[in-house]
Amino acid sequence: MPSFAVVNQKGGVGKTTACCNLAAGLARQGRRVLLVDLDPQAHLSLSLFPAVATDAGVPTLADLVHRRATLDQVLQRGENLDLIPAGPALGTLEGETTRQAWWDLVREHVAPLTDGYDSIFFDCPPTLGFLAVNGMVAARNILVPLQPEYLALQSLSSLAKTISVLRRDIEPHLSLSAIFLNGFDKRRRLHREIQRLVRAHFPEQLMEATVRKTTALAEAPSFGQDIFRYAPKSNGAWDFAALCREFERRFNHAEGFPPGT
């Protein structure tokens, strides 16, 4: 199974929720999964490893990049699910980077780990700047959680154009590989219409599985748990389990990638 950068330049669309629960679901199926938190707010780290994220003495990705810590020191290990945590220092990384190939910084430092995992998920900040580009280049495959709103379609179109530019100028293998609708309610006409429009423009990328908006998904991070541990019988757990099964079917073999967009 390939690696994914979870990207959307709009905040509050469920990127971190997707990273957390997709990774947890795949780990429960026996997959070895690595999470890389690229957001200086460290919400992914807080969601699954709260003790790590709130300890100022724990080294983060920024420490790894600046060679203040080794990969082994930065890596936080769980059951089939490991994390490279983020912290506020990531926010200043762009200004401190002098290398010409700035977009390859994260891939260079994470590359030694790739053979040890079935998949890696990069949780990108809600921008298309330095850190998000690094995540996309490192993963090559982009996963977009999309809210069923008309303005979200504009964001998706903008992201697709950015991917085309990055593919041309930086990483020719970059691919918009998967889109899923988050907060979807099939009873609402607008949501069904957005689903139809996304399918019309991105038929290969749109996942059949959708995720409903539930209280349990919003609550789980405050307990430092994924949805499968926090509320295993909830709609959120059911929906993410279905999404994980579809990921297994679609991406279990690298040659099964949908074409880039």
Image: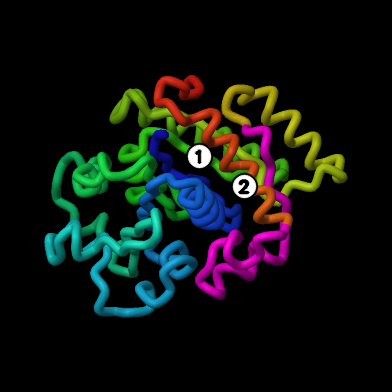
Magenta segment range? 207-234
Of 214 and 119, the residue lying toward us? 119
Query: In this figure, which residue is indicated by the disc labeled 2?
Result: 241
Residue 16 screen position, x and y as percent: 51, 56
Query: In this figure, which residue is indicated by the disc labeled 1?
Result: 143
**Mark 1 surroundings: few (<14), some (14-19) or many (≥20) residues within 10 A:** many
Task: Quote the CA–CA distance across marks 1 and 2.
Answer: 17 Å
Residue occupying image coordinates x 67% and y 38%: 209
In the rendered view of the protein, which quadrant contains the N terminus?
top left
| Three-letter amino acid code of the residue under disc 2 | Ala
Q: Classify mark 1: helix, strand or loop.
A: strand
Q: 226 above or below 19?
A: below
Q: 254 above or below 26?
A: above
Residue occupying image coordinates x 39% and y 54%: 80
176 displayed left or right of 85: right
Q: Classify mark 2: helix, strand or loop.
A: helix
240 displayed left or right of 65: right
Of 76 and 100, the residue lying toward us? 76
Residue occupying image coordinates x 74% and y 47%: 184
